[in-house]
Image (cartoon, rainbow, N blue to C red):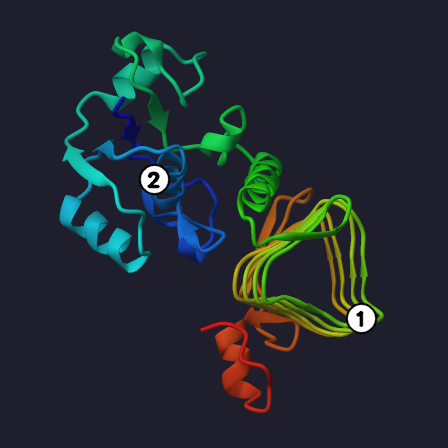
Amino acid sequence: MIPTIICPEEKCVFKTRQLKISMARFPLLGMSLLHHALTHFWNQGGEQVIIETNEDPDELKTMLEAETTPDLEIAFQKAPGIETERERKPSTPRMRLPNRGGTNPIVWLDRLINADSIPLFRSFETYLAAVKALAESRSRLRPDTSEPFRGVYVGRGTVVSSGAEIRSPCWIGENVQIERGTKISEGSVIGDGCLIDRNALIRDSFVENGTYVGQNLIINNAIVNGQDWIQIKQRSYSIVQDAHLVSPINFYRRTHPALTPVLYS
């Protein structure tokens, strides 16, 4: 069985700085969407995969090498007629299209394999729902992920200070530092290498890998990635200029050299 991953040409609909890229390159929890799909097939015991794309194969290979992609034999093919095929069967979930024939699985890269009923880029709400499904599936796959109490998953190397409050269900990645007085409430996903400073409140939100969240900050039903802040219900996007509120962790480390330990590199 050799799966085929189809990379649509359309760009992501989110109007942020880093989303002016193809779906294959879209970053999510520290990996591109294409990397997530390849990792899934590798975890299933796969050895080969076909990638249909109209992007430059050499550029995608360079990206995958930088991400330390699983050791799969990858064949790149041009993808003529992708839009025509999708329009012919608009009601069919793009994750698996039966009209290609054969038994090999076919994956559209506009959604996650572990959440193929949820389109990633139809709305901010569906994006957050897909992220939660991905975080839960990853935490259950990794043997090094602890579950200190039911519904709360914490990755290795994460430090939770005394006085912090965490409510299930939520997912916290690796090498995260959560300072005292912080409250992480239901439905939140904290990516790897984040620093959540004192007395912050995060509720039903996604904080992407390598983000600093400042003291006393409230993040409610939002998507935060470095300086990028998406407020889901209001469907608004803004760039936060004050690094004491939110910022990439590496930028925060440069402006605060006394920060210890080194969380993210």
Q: Secondary structure at mark 2?
A: helix
Question: Residue at the location (53% across, 30% down)?
Answer: 115
Question: Residue at the location (58% across, 44% down)?
Answer: 135
Q: Nearer the viewer, residue 180 or 9?
A: 180
Q: Which quadrant: the C terminus? A: bottom left
* Label whose residue precedes the other's in the sequence (2 or 1): 2
Q: Secondary structure at mark 1?
A: loop
Q: Which residue is mark 1?
A: 199
Q: Which residue is mark 2?
A: 38
Q: Please tell me whether residue 3 is drawn above or below residue 59 in the rendered image.
A: above
Question: Residue at the location (79% across, 67% down)?
Answer: 182
Q: Position of residue 88 (x, y in %)?
A: 33, 10
Q: Which quadrant: the N terminus? A: top left
Look at label 1 and name its amino acid. Asn
Q: Nearer the viewer, residue 140 or 201?
A: 140
Tell whether 230 sits left or right of 27.
right
Q: Tell me whether the residue at label 2 lies in contact with that at label 1, contact meaning CB atoms closer than 8 angstroms.
A: no
The quadrant holding residue 30 is bottom left
Nearest to viewer (mark 2 / mark 1): 2
- From this viewpoint, is residue 22 visible? no
Q: Please tell me whether residue 21 is drawn above or below residue 137 in the rendered image.
A: below
Q: Nearer the viewer, residue 111 or 218?
A: 111
Q: Position of residue 123 (x, y in %)?
A: 56, 35
How packed mark 2 is, by other alpha carbons closer than 10 Å (few <14, some 14-19, many 20 or more), is: many
Look at label 2 and name its amino acid. Leu
Q: Nearer the viewer, residue 175 or 142?
A: 142
